[in-house]
Image (cartoon, grey):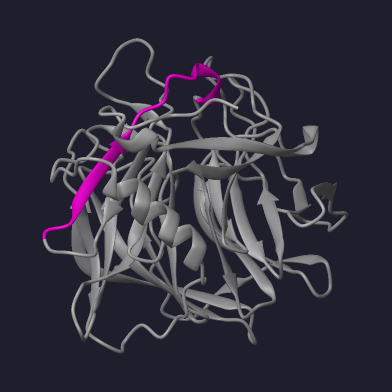
Amino acid sequence: MAVAVPPNGAGGSGWAWRPVARDALLARAYHSCTELRGRFYLVGGLLTGGTKEPSSDTVAFDPAGGQAMRLEAQGGPRRSHHGAAPVGGRWLCVVGGWDGSRRVAAVSALDVERGVWEAWTAAPGNCPPAGLSSHTCTRLSDRELRVAGREGGTRTQRRYGSIYTLKLDPAARTYCYKEEGCHTASRSGHCAALLQTPGPHPAHRLLLFGGCNSAEPEVAGHWSYGKIKEEPPVAPHLMEQIARLVNSGQGSQQGPRGLRHHSCSVVGPFAVLFGGETLTRTRDIICNDLYIYDTRKSPSLWFHFPCADRGLKRVGHQTCLWNDRLYLVGGFGEDGKTASPQVCILDFLI
């Protein structure tokens, strides 16, 4: 297990991805990985580099037992570069993505109680995007998701990205897009993090990182105190470890520039980004660095923790938070073609 340390080597602090499971069913990239009822659900993705044909299978991984299994649910969407979110503790909603021939904005849902896929229908007044891929889909509540990022067909690409609220009605199995009337930079392969602002009465901001040459995060939504009622996952031990790692490094207001197809998980006041590919190089573009965005004070600061282990390079992967642990699942490795079958846990040596 390789250990990565801060550039200044302060106090011998470091971090590492520790392998905990390995299964060929998990080897994929540009998939979604969503925790629901204590299991990780992997949907679609690309199984090998160079192909444009996404998978339509669904794999469930039990992090407690370390076992993976392919679900026999029929009608799973053929998707890659899509978004996904848990809804109502019962449904896994897959939003948009590439279906092998075009970018779509449709919503499909896996009913984990019945073990079946459902194609939800558009409600009256639906104003969908022209097509979505490499976008972000952030849960605000059981009835609302915020969708931002790449939009357009295969022959056209807008110079900006629209922001949509996606309203869901699980009882009616319907969805409805509403364009918010504001735009972001044209981003593809970015990540989104719903974070609280510091202070006694914290508000919430949805920040977009990466997906274009700029290093600046962009606000894709702002909610005043009490508007967002979602309870974030509780991870006190992981938060403490991240805080100790951050305290060993040197913060900067400058974030990673030109990063895309990386992973991002929110752990309390921290956004934890890993891997991806950079738009700033022509060779050796796949990364294995850890970035932490710390919002505990204003202005927020970035902390960069590089890694020398080329075997940890990942692109199109996912991270998932469960039981006070952060898991790394799938993605292509250094060659950009070979999918990793490993599941790893983020460890800290502090």
Q: Quadrant of residue 120?
A: bottom right
Give how far across and how far down residue 77 sits, in percent.
Answer: 68, 52
Q: Can residue 150 be seen in this snapshot? A: no
Examine the rendered structure and indicate whether residue 255 appears above or below residue 146. Answer: above
Residue 157 placement, left or right of 95: left
| Residue that extends furthest to the front in the rendered view of this protein | 11
Front residue of 56 and 304: 304
- For image coordinates 84% across by 58% down, the residue present is 73
- Above-or-below relation of 240 to 155: below
Place of residue 156 in the rendered image (x, y in percent of width and height, measured from the top left)? 32, 38
Q: Residue at x 68, y 50 (%)?
A: 42
Q: Is residue 166 visible?
A: yes
Q: Position of residue 308 (x, y in %)?
A: 43, 19
Looking at the image, the residue that sits furthest to the top is 283
Q: Quadrant of residue 166?
A: bottom left
The picture places residue 203, in percent across and down from the top left corner, at 23, 79
Is 17 one of the magenta-colored residues? no
Comparing 98 with 13, the one in front is 13
Q: Is residue 15 left or right of residue 59?
A: left
Task: Determine whether 256 is above or below 92 in the image.
Answer: above
Assess whether residue 304 is covered by the magenta stretch.
Answer: yes
Q: Which residues are magenta?
A: 299-312
Name the residue nearer the viewer: 109 or 343.
343
Quarter the C terminus occupies? top left
- Residue 130 is left or right of residue 74, and the answer is left
For the point 57% across and 62% down, the residue is: 324
Task: For the N terminus, give its image quadrant.
Answer: top right
User: How many numbered callouts?
Assistant: 0
